[in-house]
Image (spheres, rainbow, N blue to C red):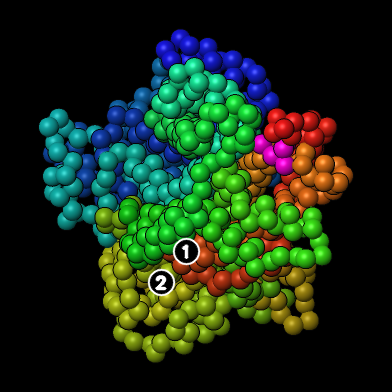
Amino acid sequence: MNARTLLLVARGTLAANGLRVALTLACIALGVALAGAVHTVHTSALAEVDRAAHALAGKADAEVRGPRNGFDDALFAAIARRPEVAVASPVIEVDAPLAGRDGALRIVGIDALRAVRLQPGFVLNSTATAAPQASSLVDADALWLTPRAAARLGAKAGDDIRVIAGTAALKLHVAGVLDALESAGDLGVMDIAAVQWRFFRVGSLTRIDLRLRPGVDLARFRAAVASLLPAGVTVSESASLSGRAAAVTRAYRVNLDALSLVALATGAFLVFSTLALQAARRRQEFALLRALGVTRRGLAALLVCEALALGVVGAAIGTALGLAGSRELLARIGTDLGAGFFGSSSAVFAPDPLALAAIAALGIGMSLAGALWVWRSVARIEVAEALRDRSLDLPLSTRAAAWTTVALAAAGVPLLFAPPVAGLPLGGYGAIALWFAASATCVAPLCRAVLGRIAPRDAPIAALALAQVRHLPGHLAASVAGIVVSASLCAAMAILVFSFRVSVEAWLDGVVRADLYVQPAAPGSDAFFSIEEQRRIAALAEVAKLEALRFDRIPLEGVAAPLTLVARPIDAGVLAGFQAEPRAMPERGAEIAVWMSEAARDLHGWRVGQRVEIPIAGKTEALRVAGVVRDFARTWGALLIPVDDYRRLTGDTRANNLAVFVAPGSDVTHAQAAIRRALPQAAALEFEDAAKLRHDSLDIFDRTFAVTYALEAIAVLIGLAGITSSFAALAWSRRREFGVLRFLGLTRGEVLRLLAMEGVATGTLGAAIGLASGALVSVVLVEVVNRQSFHWSLDVHWPVGSLATLAAAIVVVCSAGARLSGAFAVRDEAVLAVKDDA
């Protein structure tokens, strides 16, 4: 068959099967669109962070960066005097909550005369191309907004904006809009001295941007200034913030990408089912082509041509849908897919062409694989029998399938013990993929082994249904495998998420011990309570006890993600709440005791009893690890340190949060009112009682997994669509069988009931294997993937109700699908179909 004839036949076939072609295209497009949209949202989020960081850095080559709470600004002079440095620009950054409205504004304090040499956009506003007047550059109330910040706040030059500094409201005057910083994101710019003064950060810097002289190597410069840098302050490439964001979010992004690809893989079974249905209906066509001289290889070329057309068109539609969907997601909900890693409400649309091409290639490859799988059955047809409309099915060997299942399952075991690669559980993913494949290949042998023992004597229709399912035809077995894979995925994720939620809920019950929690402003900002304000609250009659919490984020040498330092009171009750091991308080010794999170233990290799050196307040402090605690809030690692020890080391007496224990005879409402009276200047206090804090935390948890739920549901729907299509293919090829049953006296309703029973048996088999496989896979997710990705230990809990609902839904849909798909095949045409055998 020449190429022209091949294309004509393929085009005619596709045109004559419009509904099935549309179903196949929808399957491929949906899988590609899901994977493409998830990946594009993530790349856009990182691109937004990278673009904003580079826009602020301008022509800088390197940056000196320290902890979130800053470092001594005396370092600036020592760095600026270095002969390797051409330009040095000091910077301080503050996340200031907005007074009277939700959200915060990131404010960057700069020395304009220095910063302009690296980024001229700092002094170019919308109304002039020259620099602003010198007086406005050093005005303590002057605030310059980027275009995005001005649009979000609805502000223009001459307006006033109120933000929170400490706990009090601060009025800033909008001096202008910096059009040249369009790509810098959502922020405001002020004079550095004004920021230090107005936000209580005198003597502190966040970073120093550097432009090195020509010929200066960054690595040699880093080594030359190492002796000048306080502990916890590092030199890195300019705009390194995007690299840290990528490191912190990598596990979450890869897990969502993997889940979306599973949905795409499940769609391969629907592609196969649709092609098998077409093959069943075209068996006489194939036989005629063979009789006319077309070789088996020619038939393979025909099927590949059709599958390639479907794959290319489906992948193209899916890529377009994925791009459109990701753009819509970015416009409506921003870069955050629920996990809270990215706080931006909008982002630059930055698709990754190579990744999208790879995803599209996967969709095309799956279409081709389905075609070649169907070709195996087409290649073995007997021409004479096929011309008489004999049925067509896929070759099936239960013995080979059984050995394949054992081999795949065994091959996955060693991967469970493989260490993570670049922080990713690739071994765990490999084991899951092999076990998914094993669960798919075990369908036929398990069907014969289990159903072979069931033979109802008093129910002939049920016996016929079980006999049919016991010897599952090839393409139905493959579609049941699709149900098994999707059900296994859904069950495994349901067990993981339920175990995770129950573990988090138990952890919250232990950690949230106070009656009331108070924040100076919205979470995540740099607002704080002074020591005087803390004492004022502690002295209230409505307050029995007050606990102060202080947070800092410390960069460690050679580690991309920073370490969070949590300063808080620690006693036996706190250790029990954090589920520490061991839970006993250590004896007071010469060294300060700290407790590491499970993530800190895994990422840094620390052990209980080990002496670790941590940079705190510009000095390296020797701390003794007293135990391990659970911390579900930070995947990048945390250390708990007694707040009194932290204050002694740093001299920092401020608090980010306050935990209030209400006095006997009072209640939360009265305590809130008393705190407001004690702090009359506080403009944006945030109160949460214990119940609300637990509820909000679990709500954040549910939002985090919302995308996961959606991807699971789509994977199951694709699998169910595949088995419905397979039932249609089987019903078409079994028309003679139905005709014989009608001649033997079965009514049309009884034949349809037979098909419904076959659907029940098939769905029950698929659900049972899927749930069993899902239970095994969930162990891998909990003990390998979760531990290597997020470094959290979980207690396994079984969502019995959800799993039962999933199994029932699969059985019901399979039963209904089998009955509806066979309705056409058991009409009068089925009776007439036996005439060919006369």
Mark 2 crowd level (few <14, some 14–19, many ≥20, 10 Å Cα): many
Disc 2 + disc 1, Cβ < 8 Å: no
Q: In which quarter of the image is residue 230?
A: bottom left
Q: Residue at x 49, y 23 (%)?
A: 290
Instruction: Say left or right for 835 vs 264.
Output: right
- The local secondary structure at tag 1 comes to helix
Question: In the rendered view, would you say 210 is above or below 460?
Answer: above
Q: Is residue 99 magenta?
A: no
| Amino acid type indicated by mark 1 | Val
Can you name the residue that lies furthest to the top here?
4
Q: Residue at x 62, y 78 (%)?
A: 545
Residue sitting nearer the eye, 43 or 296: 296
Instruction: Say left or right for 253 vs 541.
Output: left
Residue under numbered circle 2: 596
Can you name the residue that lies furthest to the front here?
838
Residue 579: percent from the left, percent from the top? 52, 78
Over which residues does the magenta segment extend?
733-737
Residue under numbered circle 1: 780
